[in-house]
Amino acid sequence: MARALILGGGMIGSTMAMDLAEDPSFDVTVADVRDEVLAALARDHGVKVLRADLSDVAELVALAEGFDVVLGALSSRMGLRTLRAMIAAGTPYVDVSFMADDPLSLREEALAAGVPFVVDCGVSPGLGSMLAGHATTVLDPCEELQILVGGVPLQRHWPYEYKAGFDPADVIEEYVRPARLREDGKTVTVPALSGVERVDFEGLGTLEAFYTDGLRTLLHTLDVPTMREKTMRYPGHAALMEVLRDSGYFSETPIDLGGQRVRPLDLTRALLFPRWSYGEGEVDLTVLRVEASGRRDGRLERLRWDMIDRLDPKTGLRSMSRTTAFPATLVARLVAQGRITEPGIVPPEILGQRPDVLDEVLAGLRVRGIDVRFERTHG
Amino acid sequence: MARALILGGGMIGSTMAMDLAEDPSFDVTVADVRDEVLAALARDHGVKVLRADLSDVAELVALAEGFDVVLGALSSRMGLRTLRAMIAAGTPYVDVSFMADDPLSLREEALAAGVPFVVDCGVSPGLGSMLAGHATTVLDPCEELQILVGGVPLQRHWPYEYKAGFDPADVIEEYVRPARLREDGKTVTVPALSGVERVDFEGLGTLEAFYTDGLRTLLHTLDVPTMREKTMRYPGHAALMEVLRDSGYFSETPIDLGGQRVRPLDLTRALLFPRWSYGEGEVDLTVLRVEASGRRDGRLERLRWDMIDRLDPKTGLRSMSRTTAFPATLVARLVAQGRITEPGIVPPEILGQRPDVLDEVLAGLRVRGIDVRFERTHG
């Protein structure tokens, strides 16, 4: 029986707990600082719980020792610090936090620890990265990669037609941070929210896609000359966000209002975030499209994977929680089973280059109601 | 020689001063609290100047006595208070301040003072109201009236494509205050910024028009069953303003940001108003369209007046200043000449019902480079 520790009992962490608790090969513990969260998890899913201050690195290290695998479901701000603690503890780790920092900066220490530390293992980065990595093993050469991902509410309410499946502050951060992409072998930086294009999905309609800084480790791990990552929303969202951003409403630099120092982002937080929160049972959608083109046996070939997932009415679990948590729990199983042992920082695109790992993840997602449709075209 | 006092030496007041100073029949004095403004006016236009705190009602009353006519060019917030002071002083008055308050509330006192107090005498309300009033004397009955007015910069800069010819706070106020209009004889209230429609102008292109609360005294003075007033901007502006307004960014109710009480409008003021200010020499446009329909000798007839004015490169005067100040100086001439003597609150639509007054105003505008094109169609 594998002993798994889940860091954080929030939306993603509790979805991980629910998933692993149903697996008799796992003994699951959830650590969080909030008593009420822990009580609910123990009651609803029969997992062990542990009250701990996860912002305390020493406490984190002590906590992780003795577990077979740790799953990270903490906020992006705690991402790098937690990764560092897991490396210090020497415990295999699977993390979904979309940290702003570069996890590859800890490459050496991670390698020395001798066990795998799988980072960015949610939906995208995560599942999208695995599919991108897989494409590079099918096409030779793989000339172009594009990852489109987005979370949107099923019901569209004026004016933003958006709700956040995770911390809205992280969403705004994505709209502000310049996006890195690769064009003809060169890494270039463009403003977030730029490059808006319309994208159609059978059964869903038209979304818009715009650049965000989501390639991350792929810029270092994959040798593909052209790579782009875009975030998707309902059409019109990017233009509104650009207006607010460029008007200064997302700025973190305090401005003086008659003697008071005010950060515009704090006001935006107060005004917009309540409107961007999902209500109980409100249906969300997660949409992922990975496209790759290149040559196979000398012929031009295009690969495309499409996923459209929605809130699961049976469990009430939101799609963003499911599509983020399940890639991590499926990979954690492979780690616990000793099927992923590669030491060091292991980004998902590297895992996706192993057909057995990708097959296992896609099969596991299918069992959980998440279908990824594949299509191949020539010429 | 008529002694004229101009209250306020800002953009509009100095334009009034410049206009009247060129007329040998006037002896012009400008009152303002700002020394540098007064010094510039005395130097550039040879007018008399008077340093005074115009927010002090007693000082205002004392100031006005002894003048033949007073012209008001103060901010909307000081509108009603200043009108009351002029009534107390018993001096004929011509005002352009677009005050939120109803000047007709001072009807009785004004009547008792025995001289005319012309209110709302800018471009619209003002010139637009005169044309509307005129239409009611041509058509019998006049069934429908529509006044469209807007100030926009010649150069359109993303995202607002707008600059304010007057205090931006007054612009936002227009976007927030519900708009009253008359439909089939009933006064109804609709949200400001609603009822967006596209309007084409020969030689200018397409603008959008939306409801604002600009009918004002016309709701009481004209017996026309359907009357609408709309503000014009470049297309898309209203939608952005609606997003900001309905997201709470125009709110004057303080919200709590971690212990600090902040009024969202104060932040908006700090972020947007610098972008909404005209630079030196930057060309502005003022666009006015008044439409009336009804019967004349039993036949259906439609009247339309169009004005498109722009910054005057000879004087450097912005169009919004010219089109606001000149109707007032032209009416002030008629008051000084004893041709407008009607006692009480006199809204411009009542003046427009006198063909001699309207002809004089339109001729005076033409001399000043402002052309109002008239068109009549049947059926």
Image (spheres, coloured by chain):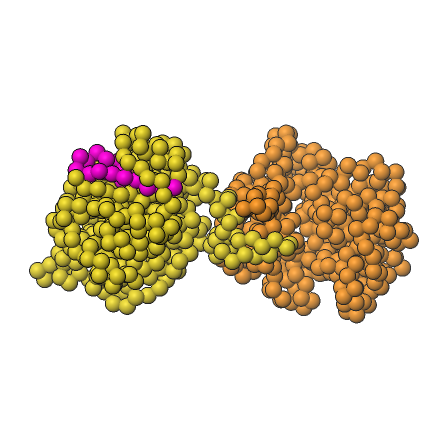
Chain colours: A orange, B yellow
* Residue B116 in the image: above or below residue B205: below
* Residue B157 in the image: above or below residue B143: above
**Residue nearest the observer in this picture, A62 or B148:** B148
- Is residue A290 left or right of B68 when viewed as pictured? right
Q: Is residue B23 magenta?
A: yes
**Residue nearest the observer in this picture, A12 or B28:** B28
Tell me how many marks there are: 0
Visible residue check, residue B371: no
Q: Residue at x 79, y 64 (%)?
A: A35
Question: Where is residue B142 shown, x and y percent of the image?
Answer: 17, 60
Specify the farthest residue to the bottom.
A43
Q: Is residue A39 magenta?
A: no
Specify the farthest residue to the left.
B297
**Residue nearest the observer in this picture, A162 or B178:** B178
Q: Which residues are magenta?
A: B15-33
Q: Residue at x 87, y 57 (%)?
A: A3
- Is residue A62 left or right of B242 when viewed as pictured? right
- Is residue A119 left or right of A163 when viewed as pictured? right
* Residue B284 in the image: above or below residue B235: above
Q: Quadrant of the N terminus of chain A?
A: bottom right
Visible residue check, residue A50: yes
Question: Where is residue B151 shown, x and y percent of the image?
Answer: 33, 44
> In the picture, residue B117 is in which quadrant?
bottom left
Q: Quadrant of the C terminus of chain A?
A: top right
Question: Where is residue B165 shown, x and y percent of the image?
Answer: 36, 42
Question: Where is residue B95 shown, x and y percent of the image?
Answer: 28, 49
Q: Residue at x 36, y 40 (%)?
A: B51
Specify the farthest residue to the right.
A66
Q: Residue at x 35, y 32 (%)?
A: B40
